[in-house]
Amino acid sequence: MRCKMAVDTTEIKKNSDWYYANLDSLLPKYDGKFIGISDCSVVGVFNTFSGGVDEMIGAGHRLGSFIVHQCVGLEEEKKRFFSRMPRMVFREVSK
């Protein structure tokens, strides 16, 4: 089976840019937690990445309209980036 991915990355980039621009204010409140961001605001807080993605989709957010990101400082994020593969989520699209 072939995997087709038709996701507009505009919203992903917008939410990601918002996360980094607001990281200093997000860290004290969400340090170490996974946060769901949609429309440039935190809409969910989760203990795991996969749980966050599942809950965001369950709440009606479509893939590509949100991000789930672990709220950590930039130095910690750099360590994680170089020490393991990035996580990706694939869902089978219903016909």
Image (cartoon, helix red, strand yellow):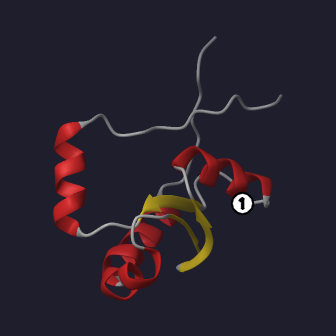
Q: In this view, does 11 lie above or below 28?
A: above
Note whether 26 is above or below 80 in the view shown: below
Q: Going by the picture, which residue comes out furthest to the bottom?
A: 25
Q: Residue visible at 69% across and 48% down? A: 54
**What residue sits right under mark 1 in the picture?**
61
Q: In which quarter of the image is the N terminus?
A: top right
Where residue 40 sits: x, y (%)? 52, 79
> Which is more toward the observer, 14 or 84?
84
Q: Can residue 39 be seen in this view?
A: no
Left/right of residue 90 with respect to residue 95 in the rendered view: left
Give the residue type at disc 1: His
The quadrant holding residue 37 is bottom right
Percent coordinates x, y for residue 18 in the rendering: 41, 78
Name the residue nearer the viewer: 87 or 7. Answer: 87
Q: Is mark 1 on a helix, strand or loop?
A: loop
From the top left corner, tell me how far across and down residue 20 is, in percent. 32, 75
Residue 83, position as x, y percentages in the image: 19, 39
- Looking at the image, the residue that sits furthest to the right is 95
Label 1 crowd bin: few (<14), some (14–19), many (20+), radius 10 Å: some
In the rendered view of the protein, which quadrant contains the C terminus?
top right
Q: In the rendered view, would you say 77 is above or below 26?
A: above
